[in-house]
Amino acid sequence: MASSSSSVAAPCRRFLCPLAATATASRALLSSSRTPPPTRRRLLLSTTAATIAAAMAASSQRDVSAASSCKVVDSHLHVWASPQQAKEGYSYFPGQEPTLRGDADFLLECMDEAGVDGALVVQPINHMFDHSLVSSVLKKYPSKFIGCCLANPADDGSGIKQLEHLIVQEKYRAVRFNPSLWPSGQKMTNEVGRSLFAKAGELGAPVGIMVMKGIGLYIQEIEELCRDYPETTIILDHMAFCKPPTNNEEEKAFSSFLSLSRFPQVYVKYSALFRISREAYPYEDTAQLLSRVISNYGANRIMWGSDFPFVVPECGYKGAKDAVSHVTGKISVWPSDLEWILGKTVSQLFQGAWVAP
């Protein structure tokens, strides 16, 4: 099975078996025909074996109970206004008008069909820094959704105040860094970027980083932020956009992504599989990627995400969730690790979320 560095991998259990007593022919002649009373050692071993069996049964029952109560949570999806909502005030950012349906009603239908209990809603580029639509969804469904806002890295630093407002007043729980939104020639490690990153850590909001152009372009910036601000949690979107390597350069990029596991504050989204696979659904070639990520990060630092609504025309929302079980079955992931990936990791990272009022 795929190894996991997390503490939740199924423990190896040993059974203590008492040795059967043997009697030599000479002892049989000397002994009476009665069965000898159990010795203190036999009683001790027998009691120990029974205790272990009882403990294992209790542990198994706890595992069953935990599995039945474990929520399935989507760590990465988007919602945006319907055309009607856009007319009513939730306008799209110019040039970012969506071509797919992505309203909350449609999302809820998809989640219900797939058996997904909650989600982290990431502010979409379609509304840029206007969070009003997503905020309205978060307020309407507080036990279903929490929000990840979009960082505004404008040179004037206005995004720092906006970030604080969104987290403190609007109750967003995370923030997304899109390095493509930084002013031309600027890095995420510039003065504004550092201030945004530090403020997120101060407010307890993880920073999701989308490296759509490849991890290689941003690895030094990410490492620098990890070293300088160890209290700020990072979540790498979509496996840092690493596809199964086909050459040395791609392997080097993937290895650099894996090397970030040395920073304990770094988490990974096993999300948008259609973006990181070279194959059609069910994206089986991501199995070996996932196996290596589990070995380096541990399942308790990995979380599944669909990338709704972009995933809908690719394989359907339910298909996105089902693909995870299919892929993990190819590498024999422990059931307990699968629970972490499908919901426990993100639930533990955002404690108190997805709880009915």
Image (cartoon, grey):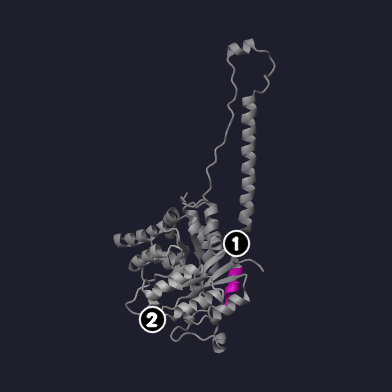
According to the picture, the residue beneath numbered tag 1 turns out to be 71
* Extreme residue in the left direction: 248
Question: Taking the image as drawn, is residue 242 in sight?
Answer: no
Amino acid carrying label 2: it is Asp
- The residue carrying pointer 1 sits among few (fewer than 14), some (14 to 19) or many (20 or more) residues within 10 Å by Cα, namely some
Q: Is residue 1 left or right of residue 139?
A: left
Amino acid carrying label 1: it is Lys
Q: Secondary structure at mark 1?
A: loop
Locate the C terminus by quadrant: bottom right
- Range drawn in magenta: 104-112
Q: Residue at x 51, y 86 (%)?
A: 91
User: Residue 272, image x and y in percent?
Assistant: 46, 67
Front residue (pair 253, 130)? 130
Q: How far apart are labels 1 and 2 at the CA level? A: 41 Å
Quadrant in the picture for residue 193: bottom left
According to the picture, the residue beneath numbered tag 2 turns out to be 155
User: Residue 3, image x and y in percent?
Assistant: 46, 50
Q: Secondary structure at mark 2?
A: loop
By secondary structure, the bulk of the magenta-drawn segment is best described as helix
Q: Residue at x 60, y 73 (%)?
A: 108
Front residue (pair 44, 339)? 44
Q: Residue at x 52, y 54 (%)?
A: 337
Pair 1/2: label in front: 2
Query: Which comes before the other along the chain, label 1 or label 2?
Result: 1
Whether residue 254 appears in magenta in the rendering, the answer is no
